[in-house]
Image (cartoon, coloured by chain):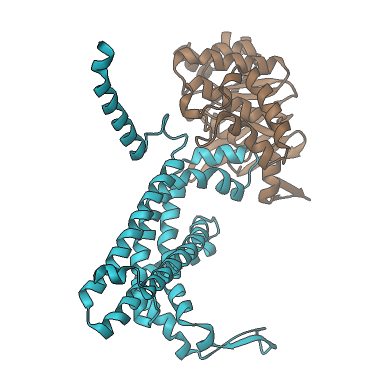
Amino acid sequence: MLRAEAIHKRFGRLQVLKGVSLEVARGEVACLLGPSGSGKSTFLRCINHLEKIDAGRLWVDGELVGYRQVGARLYELREAEVARRRAEIGMVFQHFNLFPHMTVLQNVIEAPLVVRHTAREAAARLAGELLDRVGLADKLRSYPSQLSGGQQQRVAIARALAMQPKLMLFDEPTSALDPELVGEVLDVMRGLARDGMTMVVVTHEIGFAREVSDTVVFMDDGVIVESGDPHEVISSPRNERTRAFLAKVL
Amino acid sequence: MIGHYLLAARVLRGLVATLELTAISMAIGIALGLMLAVMRLSPNPLVSTASWLYVWLFRGTPVYVQILFWYNVAALYPRLSLGLPFGGPQLLHANANTLITVFAAAILGLGLNEAAYMAEIIRAGILSVSEGQSEAAYALGMTRLKTLRRIVLPQAMRLIIPPTGNETISMLKTTSLVSVIAYTELLYSVQEIYDVNYETIPLLIVASIWYLVITSVLSVGQYYLERRFRRGAARQLAPTPLERLRRFLLAGHAQVEMPAERR
């Protein structure tokens, strides 16, 4: 589903990604762990072309992300084409980024209506099902400012799912939440994983990573230091840097 | 005296002309200003520089001069023509003196100048919306334009509307400048009257009363517009002054009735 080959990304002088390669098969959950500044979030944002990569190749479901290959050269896609491919990749942000001027229902049906031109009733029906699935069927008419952080993040997940994505990206989805609200969001994500959604999750929730993911990827300083079976990587890390990081967070 | 002229036909005609001028100039200012603001934020350096130059030019010179300029531009280029370049056939040509009427000069002077100010107001509004909002929209597959229209602008409105209200009120008063090119708006109308009867002060007061009345109406409109765009930002909208007044009166009423309940 996702294949990344030697992704490089630089912000000015700072080399953030120094050749990251990763494969995630359909239905798999990959968790990206690592200290802040290690490039996890940047890598995640490259997957839907929110950040342009400087070198390397990235495929989602067999399609090159952000570029078109002609012979040996890559050409950046036109905006509409980039947008069309992004529509198939859901993303959940650390700070939810719900649209504050819209109700919960409007937030969830917005993209289906505006991007996919779905009929309003069909979009609303799907939104109702999704909000029911994240346990917020009674909040359709609330505005985001009237919800708790955990509720907002669950709406954000429903909003992303409304586009029926092939792949879901989570960028530290619980980092901005009060500790007692983390569980409800992780529960929803656990449910998604169980239903076979392909997910790439940047997280600091080591317990969640161990329990849910098929692959754990440990990143530091722009490279993948160690990756593999979650129990092995987390319980008996081979790399020194992984060990040092886990010792601090566990 | 004042009462007599307040509703005089010539004054009312002038008032209507002032309102027309305000509405059209603001419409041009907002439409063109929005375009300039979007251009200014474009990743294309050519486009953003063009917008910057426009604002620099039109904000950097007095609107009074601009009105005189448009009025007199006909003298500089008496014939305007639209044709194909490099000696191609002329498709349209007209006498600039008939094309740029006093009205057109007034509209151009006021509208193009206003666009420069509106561009800055709208740009500031757009920039106030956090980047996460656009990112969320992009991630959902929305294009730059859709994101602007559906997500960013509605939120920017909260910041755009108060200064736009001020601009409208300011425009209402600035239209009086076009009396200099003899456009018969409110001020010019009363001038025409007092040039004959020498009742200068009463007639200036007549004009001022009308400016005040319209300004007041615009302020109330602005209040309700701002309220509408605060949706979602506050958990609960504060009551309007009218609601507060009614509650105050009802509460006062209830207090008076209380002793009766005790009986």
Q: Residue at x 56, y 35 (%)?
A: A17
**Residue A47 vs residue B163, the one in the foreground:** B163
Question: Splitting the image into 4 quarters, where does residue A141 fall?
Answer: top right
* Image quadrant containing the N terminus of chain A: top right
Asked if residue A225 lies left or right of residue A199, the reply is left
Asked if residue A113 lies left or right of residue B31, the reply is right
Image colour assigned to chain A: brown
Q: Residue at x 49, y 62 (%)?
A: B27
**Residue B9 vs residue B163, the one in the foreground:** B9
Q: Position of residue A13 (x, y in %)?
A: 47, 44
Q: Position of residue B198 (x, y in %)?
A: 22, 82
Q: Is residue B17 visible?
A: yes
**Residue B166 vs residue A50, the one in the foreground:** B166
Question: Splitting the image into 4 quarters, where does residue A19 fall?
Answer: top right
According to the colouring, which chain is cyan? B
Q: Is residue B61 visible?
A: no
Image height of A92 relative to B225, above or below: above
Q: Position of residue A117 (x, y in %)?
A: 72, 41
Q: Position of residue B86 (x, y in %)?
A: 66, 87
